[in-house]
Amino acid sequence: MNSEFDIIRRYFKRAASNAALGIGDDAALIDITPGNELAISTDTLVCGKHFFADTDPYRLGHKSLAVNLSDMAAMGAKPRWALLALTLPETLAQQNQTWLQQFSAGFFALAEQHHVELIGGDTTAGPLNICVQILGEVEKEKALRRSGAKSGDDIWVSGTLGDAALALQHLLGKIVLNPDEIDQCLPALLTPAPRIELGRRLIGLAHSAIDISDGLVADLGHILQNSEKSAVIHLHSIPCSPVLKKRLPQSVAMACLLAGGDDYELCFTAPTAHRAKITMLAAELRMPLTCIGEISSGEGLIVKDAQGKTMTLETTGYDHFSTGNR
Ligand code: ADP
Ligand code: MG
Protein backbone atom coordinates (compact mmCIF):
# COMPACT_ATOMS: atom_id res chain seq x y z
CA MET A 1 0.00 0.00 0.00
CA ASN A 2 1.19 3.48 -0.87
CA SER A 3 0.27 6.00 1.81
CA GLU A 4 0.24 9.71 1.02
CA PHE A 5 3.61 10.00 2.75
CA ASP A 6 5.08 7.03 0.86
CA ILE A 7 4.04 8.64 -2.40
CA ILE A 8 5.68 11.95 -1.54
CA ARG A 9 8.86 10.31 -0.29
CA ARG A 10 9.17 7.76 -3.12
CA TYR A 11 8.23 9.83 -6.10
CA PHE A 12 8.51 13.50 -5.36
CA LYS A 13 11.09 14.20 -2.68
CA ARG A 14 14.52 14.78 -4.15
CA ALA A 15 17.64 16.26 -2.64
CA ALA A 16 17.18 20.01 -2.25
CA SER A 17 19.22 22.10 -4.63
CA ASN A 18 18.50 25.80 -4.57
CA ALA A 19 15.59 26.26 -2.14
CA ALA A 20 16.43 27.28 1.42
CA LEU A 21 13.91 24.60 2.53
CA GLY A 22 12.26 22.12 0.17
CA ILE A 23 9.73 19.31 0.59
CA GLY A 24 9.03 18.06 4.11
CA ASP A 25 7.94 20.97 6.25
CA ASP A 26 4.67 22.91 6.34
CA ALA A 27 5.98 25.33 3.77
CA ALA A 28 9.03 25.72 1.57
CA LEU A 29 11.41 28.64 1.92
CA ILE A 30 13.12 30.35 -0.98
CA ASP A 31 15.60 33.16 -1.39
CA ILE A 32 14.96 35.51 -4.26
CA THR A 33 17.88 36.84 -6.26
CA PRO A 34 18.31 40.58 -5.47
CA GLY A 35 17.05 42.87 -8.24
CA ASN A 36 14.46 40.32 -9.38
CA GLU A 37 10.71 39.99 -9.05
CA LEU A 38 8.86 36.72 -8.53
CA ALA A 39 6.71 35.60 -11.46
CA ILE A 40 4.05 33.20 -10.16
CA SER A 41 1.49 31.20 -12.07
CA THR A 42 -0.57 28.04 -11.82
CA ASP A 43 -2.27 25.75 -14.32
CA THR A 44 -4.45 22.70 -13.76
CA LEU A 45 -4.91 19.67 -15.99
CA VAL A 46 -8.21 17.89 -15.40
CA CYS A 47 -8.64 14.31 -16.55
CA GLY A 48 -11.29 14.08 -19.26
CA LYS A 49 -11.06 17.79 -19.99
CA HIS A 50 -7.39 18.54 -20.64
CA PHE A 51 -6.20 14.99 -21.29
CA PHE A 52 -7.59 11.52 -21.92
CA ALA A 53 -7.69 9.11 -18.96
CA ASP A 54 -5.33 6.71 -20.76
CA THR A 55 -2.67 9.34 -21.57
CA ASP A 56 0.83 8.00 -21.10
CA PRO A 57 1.82 9.12 -17.55
CA TYR A 58 5.41 10.05 -18.51
CA ARG A 59 4.11 12.50 -21.11
CA LEU A 60 1.47 13.75 -18.70
CA GLY A 61 4.17 14.51 -16.15
CA HIS A 62 6.06 16.42 -18.83
CA LYS A 63 3.02 18.34 -20.00
CA SER A 64 1.74 19.30 -16.55
CA LEU A 65 5.02 21.13 -15.96
CA ALA A 66 5.43 22.31 -19.57
CA VAL A 67 2.18 24.28 -19.62
CA ASN A 68 3.33 26.12 -16.50
CA LEU A 69 6.83 26.73 -17.84
CA SER A 70 5.22 28.22 -20.91
CA ASP A 71 3.65 30.93 -18.73
CA MET A 72 7.11 31.76 -17.42
CA ALA A 73 8.39 31.93 -21.00
CA ALA A 74 5.63 34.35 -21.91
CA MET A 75 6.71 36.68 -19.10
CA GLY A 76 10.40 36.42 -19.95
CA ALA A 77 10.96 34.83 -16.54
CA LYS A 78 13.46 32.20 -15.53
CA PRO A 79 11.53 29.34 -13.89
CA ARG A 80 13.03 28.20 -10.59
CA TRP A 81 10.57 26.43 -8.29
CA ALA A 82 7.40 24.37 -8.69
CA LEU A 83 4.66 23.00 -6.44
CA LEU A 84 2.54 20.04 -7.41
CA ALA A 85 -0.98 19.43 -6.08
CA LEU A 86 -1.91 15.96 -7.21
CA THR A 87 -5.34 14.41 -6.80
CA LEU A 88 -5.05 10.73 -7.55
CA PRO A 89 -7.57 7.89 -7.81
CA GLU A 90 -6.75 4.94 -5.50
CA THR A 91 -6.31 2.70 -8.54
CA LEU A 92 -3.40 4.79 -9.87
CA ALA A 93 -1.82 5.31 -6.45
CA GLN A 94 -1.70 1.55 -5.84
CA GLN A 95 -1.12 0.40 -9.44
CA ASN A 96 2.19 -1.39 -8.99
CA GLN A 97 3.71 2.05 -8.75
CA THR A 98 3.96 2.26 -12.52
CA TRP A 99 1.78 5.31 -13.04
CA LEU A 100 3.45 7.39 -10.33
CA GLN A 101 6.90 6.26 -11.38
CA GLN A 102 6.30 7.28 -14.97
CA PHE A 103 4.50 10.50 -14.13
CA SER A 104 7.22 11.71 -11.78
CA ALA A 105 9.95 10.66 -14.25
CA GLY A 106 8.35 12.77 -16.99
CA PHE A 107 7.88 15.69 -14.62
CA PHE A 108 11.46 15.62 -13.32
CA ALA A 109 13.05 15.11 -16.73
CA LEU A 110 11.64 18.45 -17.86
CA ALA A 111 12.25 20.08 -14.47
CA GLU A 112 15.93 19.15 -14.62
CA GLN A 113 16.25 20.40 -18.16
CA HIS A 114 15.17 23.84 -16.96
CA HIS A 115 16.81 23.67 -13.50
CA VAL A 116 13.45 23.84 -11.76
CA GLU A 117 13.19 22.45 -8.24
CA LEU A 118 10.01 20.82 -6.89
CA ILE A 119 9.69 22.37 -3.44
CA GLY A 120 6.26 21.20 -2.28
CA GLY A 121 2.73 20.30 -3.10
CA ASP A 122 -0.21 18.32 -1.87
CA THR A 123 -1.33 14.75 -2.42
CA THR A 124 -4.97 13.77 -2.11
CA ALA A 125 -7.21 10.91 -3.23
CA GLY A 126 -9.94 11.66 -5.75
CA PRO A 127 -10.56 12.01 -9.48
CA LEU A 128 -7.27 12.54 -11.36
CA ASN A 129 -6.34 16.20 -11.35
CA ILE A 130 -2.90 17.78 -11.66
CA CYS A 131 -2.31 21.31 -10.49
CA VAL A 132 1.15 22.79 -10.79
CA GLN A 133 2.25 26.12 -9.45
CA ILE A 134 5.37 27.65 -10.88
CA LEU A 135 7.60 30.38 -9.49
CA GLY A 136 10.22 32.15 -11.52
CA GLU A 137 12.42 35.19 -11.40
CA VAL A 138 12.56 38.11 -13.74
CA GLU A 139 14.62 41.27 -13.57
CA LYS A 140 12.64 44.03 -11.85
CA GLU A 141 10.23 45.85 -14.20
CA LYS A 142 11.52 43.93 -17.22
CA ALA A 143 8.82 41.24 -17.48
CA LEU A 144 7.05 40.92 -20.84
CA ARG A 145 3.44 41.88 -20.31
CA ARG A 146 0.35 41.55 -22.45
CA SER A 147 -0.22 45.27 -22.13
CA GLY A 148 2.93 46.56 -23.81
CA ALA A 149 2.07 46.41 -27.55
CA LYS A 150 2.62 49.68 -29.43
CA SER A 151 1.18 50.89 -32.74
CA GLY A 152 3.52 49.95 -35.58
CA ASP A 153 4.86 46.85 -33.78
CA ASP A 154 5.39 43.70 -35.80
CA ILE A 155 3.51 40.64 -34.54
CA TRP A 156 5.67 37.53 -34.32
CA VAL A 157 5.05 33.90 -33.47
CA SER A 158 7.53 31.16 -32.66
CA GLY A 159 7.51 27.66 -34.15
CA THR A 160 4.52 26.43 -36.10
CA LEU A 161 0.89 26.61 -35.03
CA GLY A 162 -1.98 24.16 -35.08
CA ASP A 163 -0.34 20.73 -34.87
CA ALA A 164 -1.50 20.05 -31.30
CA ALA A 165 -5.08 20.85 -32.24
CA LEU A 166 -4.79 18.77 -35.40
CA ALA A 167 -3.58 15.79 -33.36
CA LEU A 168 -6.46 16.29 -30.96
CA GLN A 169 -8.97 16.34 -33.81
CA HIS A 170 -7.51 13.02 -34.90
CA LEU A 171 -7.75 11.51 -31.40
CA LEU A 172 -11.36 12.71 -31.21
CA GLY A 173 -12.08 10.91 -34.48
CA LYS A 174 -13.02 14.09 -36.35
CA ILE A 175 -10.25 13.78 -38.93
CA VAL A 176 -7.95 10.96 -39.93
CA LEU A 177 -4.18 11.47 -39.96
CA ASN A 178 -1.95 8.74 -41.36
CA PRO A 179 0.66 7.19 -39.01
CA ASP A 180 3.44 9.44 -40.33
CA GLU A 181 1.34 12.53 -39.81
CA ILE A 182 0.39 11.40 -36.30
CA ASP A 183 4.10 11.04 -35.47
CA GLN A 184 4.67 14.57 -36.68
CA CYS A 185 1.74 16.20 -34.85
CA LEU A 186 1.32 14.26 -31.61
CA PRO A 187 4.46 15.55 -29.83
CA ALA A 188 3.04 19.09 -30.01
CA LEU A 189 -0.01 17.90 -28.08
CA LEU A 190 1.63 15.52 -25.62
CA THR A 191 5.11 16.90 -24.99
CA PRO A 192 5.18 20.61 -25.82
CA ALA A 193 8.55 22.36 -25.49
CA PRO A 194 8.15 25.57 -23.47
CA ARG A 195 9.99 28.50 -25.06
CA ILE A 196 11.89 29.58 -21.96
CA GLU A 197 15.11 30.63 -23.69
CA LEU A 198 13.18 32.63 -26.27
CA GLY A 199 11.20 34.43 -23.55
CA ARG A 200 14.40 35.34 -21.71
CA ARG A 201 16.02 36.66 -24.89
CA LEU A 202 12.97 38.73 -25.81
CA ILE A 203 13.45 40.96 -22.79
CA GLY A 204 14.58 44.28 -24.23
CA LEU A 205 13.46 43.26 -27.74
CA ALA A 206 9.70 42.70 -27.42
CA HIS A 207 7.09 45.15 -26.20
CA SER A 208 4.55 42.45 -25.26
CA ALA A 209 4.18 38.68 -25.23
CA ILE A 210 1.75 35.86 -24.50
CA ASP A 211 1.92 32.10 -24.87
CA ILE A 212 -0.51 30.53 -27.30
CA SER A 213 -2.46 28.13 -25.14
CA ASP A 214 -5.99 28.99 -26.27
CA GLY A 215 -5.30 29.62 -29.96
CA LEU A 216 -3.72 32.50 -31.87
CA VAL A 217 -6.87 34.60 -32.34
CA ALA A 218 -7.88 34.36 -28.69
CA ASP A 219 -4.39 34.92 -27.28
CA LEU A 220 -3.39 37.72 -29.64
CA GLY A 221 -6.82 39.11 -28.72
CA HIS A 222 -5.64 39.31 -25.10
CA ILE A 223 -2.61 41.36 -26.13
CA LEU A 224 -4.85 43.69 -28.13
CA GLN A 225 -7.35 44.09 -25.33
CA ASN A 226 -4.70 44.66 -22.66
CA SER A 227 -2.73 47.05 -24.87
CA GLU A 228 -5.86 48.77 -26.24
CA LYS A 229 -4.71 48.23 -29.81
CA SER A 230 -5.88 46.60 -33.04
CA ALA A 231 -4.07 44.28 -35.43
CA VAL A 232 -4.01 42.88 -38.93
CA ILE A 233 -2.56 39.41 -39.46
CA HIS A 234 -1.99 37.64 -42.76
CA LEU A 235 -3.25 34.08 -42.99
CA HIS A 236 -0.64 32.99 -45.52
CA SER A 237 2.21 34.10 -43.28
CA ILE A 238 1.15 32.09 -40.22
CA PRO A 239 3.73 29.30 -39.92
CA CYS A 240 2.40 25.75 -39.97
CA SER A 241 3.66 22.23 -40.54
CA PRO A 242 3.40 20.52 -43.94
CA VAL A 243 0.76 18.20 -42.41
CA LEU A 244 -1.50 21.13 -41.61
CA LYS A 245 -0.67 23.10 -44.76
CA LYS A 246 -1.76 20.19 -46.90
CA ARG A 247 -5.24 20.45 -45.37
CA LEU A 248 -5.72 24.19 -45.93
CA PRO A 249 -8.13 25.76 -46.64
CA GLN A 250 -10.36 23.10 -45.08
CA SER A 251 -12.17 24.64 -42.16
CA VAL A 252 -10.82 22.14 -39.58
CA ALA A 253 -7.23 22.99 -40.59
CA MET A 254 -8.02 26.70 -40.59
CA ALA A 255 -9.54 26.41 -37.14
CA CYS A 256 -6.50 24.49 -35.85
CA LEU A 257 -4.17 27.16 -37.21
CA LEU A 258 -6.06 30.20 -35.95
CA ALA A 259 -7.91 28.90 -32.94
CA GLY A 260 -6.23 25.63 -31.98
CA GLY A 261 -5.22 25.44 -28.34
CA ASP A 262 -2.23 23.79 -26.69
CA ASP A 263 0.46 25.21 -28.99
CA TYR A 264 2.61 26.75 -26.24
CA GLU A 265 4.42 28.87 -28.76
CA LEU A 266 4.99 32.55 -28.01
CA CYS A 267 3.22 35.39 -29.75
CA PHE A 268 5.02 38.70 -29.22
CA THR A 269 5.11 42.20 -30.59
CA ALA A 270 8.27 44.18 -31.25
CA PRO A 271 9.24 47.44 -32.95
CA THR A 272 10.23 47.13 -36.61
CA ALA A 273 13.71 48.40 -35.67
CA HIS A 274 14.34 45.01 -34.00
CA ARG A 275 13.59 42.88 -37.09
CA ALA A 276 17.22 42.04 -37.81
CA LYS A 277 17.95 41.16 -34.18
CA ILE A 278 14.89 38.90 -34.00
CA THR A 279 15.89 37.17 -37.24
CA MET A 280 19.36 36.58 -35.80
CA LEU A 281 17.82 35.27 -32.58
CA ALA A 282 15.76 32.77 -34.59
CA ALA A 283 18.94 31.47 -36.23
CA GLU A 284 20.77 31.29 -32.93
CA LEU A 285 17.95 29.44 -31.14
CA ARG A 286 17.31 27.32 -34.25
CA MET A 287 13.61 27.98 -34.15
CA PRO A 288 11.35 29.70 -36.65
CA LEU A 289 10.29 33.20 -35.65
CA THR A 290 7.79 34.53 -38.15
CA CYS A 291 6.30 37.98 -38.55
CA ILE A 292 2.57 37.52 -39.20
CA GLY A 293 1.16 41.04 -39.03
CA GLU A 294 1.19 44.44 -37.41
CA ILE A 295 -0.28 46.37 -34.50
CA SER A 296 -2.26 49.57 -35.05
CA SER A 297 -4.30 51.97 -33.00
CA GLY A 298 -7.99 51.20 -32.55
CA GLU A 299 -9.51 47.88 -31.60
CA GLY A 300 -10.21 44.46 -33.07
CA LEU A 301 -8.32 41.82 -35.03
CA ILE A 302 -8.50 41.48 -38.80
CA VAL A 303 -7.35 38.33 -40.60
CA LYS A 304 -6.48 38.84 -44.30
CA ASP A 305 -6.31 36.10 -46.91
CA ALA A 306 -3.63 35.77 -49.61
CA GLN A 307 -5.49 38.28 -51.81
CA GLY A 308 -5.60 40.79 -48.98
CA LYS A 309 -9.32 40.25 -48.42
CA THR A 310 -10.67 40.41 -44.88
CA MET A 311 -11.81 36.99 -43.74
CA THR A 312 -14.92 36.31 -41.69
CA LEU A 313 -15.07 34.16 -38.59
CA GLU A 314 -16.68 31.32 -40.54
CA THR A 315 -14.01 31.28 -43.24
CA THR A 316 -11.23 31.34 -40.67
CA GLY A 317 -12.90 28.39 -38.93
CA TYR A 318 -12.69 30.33 -35.69
CA ASP A 319 -16.30 29.78 -34.65
CA HIS A 320 -15.84 26.10 -35.47
CA PHE A 321 -13.72 25.91 -32.34
CA SER A 322 -15.58 28.37 -30.17
CA THR A 323 -18.99 26.73 -30.15
CA GLY A 324 -18.44 24.10 -27.50
CA ASN A 325 -16.23 21.85 -29.60
CA ARG A 326 -13.37 22.03 -27.11
P1 ADP B 1 0.46 19.39 5.29
O1 ADP B 1 -0.12 18.33 6.16
O2 ADP B 1 1.13 20.51 6.01
O3 ADP B 1 -0.46 19.83 4.19
P2 ADP B 1 1.56 17.38 3.68
O4 ADP B 1 1.58 16.22 4.58
O5 ADP B 1 0.45 17.52 2.70
O6 ADP B 1 1.69 18.68 4.55
O7 ADP B 1 2.92 17.44 2.85
C1 ADP B 1 4.16 17.16 3.46
C2 ADP B 1 5.25 17.77 2.61
O8 ADP B 1 5.25 17.15 1.33
C3 ADP B 1 5.07 19.26 2.36
O9 ADP B 1 6.35 19.83 2.29
C4 ADP B 1 4.41 19.32 1.01
O10 ADP B 1 4.70 20.54 0.35
C5 ADP B 1 5.04 18.12 0.32
N1 ADP B 1 4.18 17.50 -0.73
C6 ADP B 1 2.97 16.94 -0.56
N2 ADP B 1 2.51 16.43 -1.72
C7 ADP B 1 3.46 16.69 -2.67
C8 ADP B 1 3.57 16.43 -4.06
N3 ADP B 1 2.63 15.81 -4.76
N4 ADP B 1 4.70 16.86 -4.66
C9 ADP B 1 5.66 17.50 -3.98
N5 ADP B 1 5.62 17.75 -2.69
C10 ADP B 1 4.53 17.36 -2.01
MG1 MG C 1 -1.51 18.53 2.85
Image (cartoon, rainbow, N blue to C red):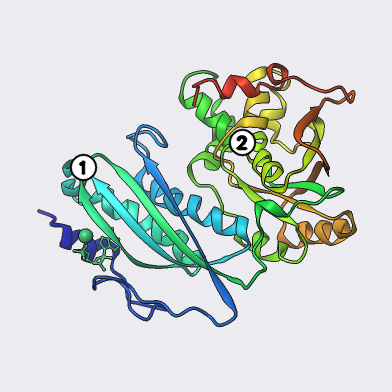
The single residue placed furthest to the left in the displayed view is: 1
Q: Judge the density around disc 2: few (<14), some (14-19), many (≥20) Cα neighbours within 10 Å.
A: many
Residue closer to the observer: 240 or 314: 314
Answer yes or no: is residue 177 visible: no
- Quadrant observed for ligand 1 in the rendered image: bottom left
Q: Amino acid at mark 1?
A: Gly
Secondary structure beneath disc 2? loop
Mark 2 lies within 8 Å of ligand 1 (Cβ measured): no
Element marked by disc 1: loop
| Residue 31 placement, left or right of 87 | right
Question: Mark 2 to mark 1: distance in Å?
Answer: 31 Å
Where is residue 131? Give x, y as percent: 36, 50
Query: Left or right of 96: which side holds 36?
Result: right
Task: Give the mark nearest the N terminus, 2 or 1.
Answer: 1
The residue drawn where x is 41% and y is 77% is 30
Q: Is residue 291 at all visible to an observer of this figure?
A: yes
Horizontal arrangement in the rendering, residue 181 relative to residue 209 (left or right)? left
Q: Nearer the viewer, residue 5 or 60?
A: 5
Q: Where on the picture, by quarter, is residue 27? A: bottom left
Q: Quadrant of residue 232?
A: top right
- Give the number of the disc on residue 215: 2
Q: How many marks?
A: 2
Residue at the spot 55% in from the left edge and 59% down from the top edge: 72
* Numbered label attached to residue 37: none
Amino acid carrying label 2: it is Gly
- Spot occupied by residue 119 in the image (x, y as percentages of width and height): 35, 69
Q: Residue at x 71, y 65 (%)?
A: 203
**What residue is shown at x 56% (from left), y 32% (from top)?**
165
Q: Where residue 19 sits in the image (x, y, percent)?
A: 39, 77
Q: Which residue is mark 1?
A: 126
Q: Position of residue 166 (x, y in %)?
A: 58, 29
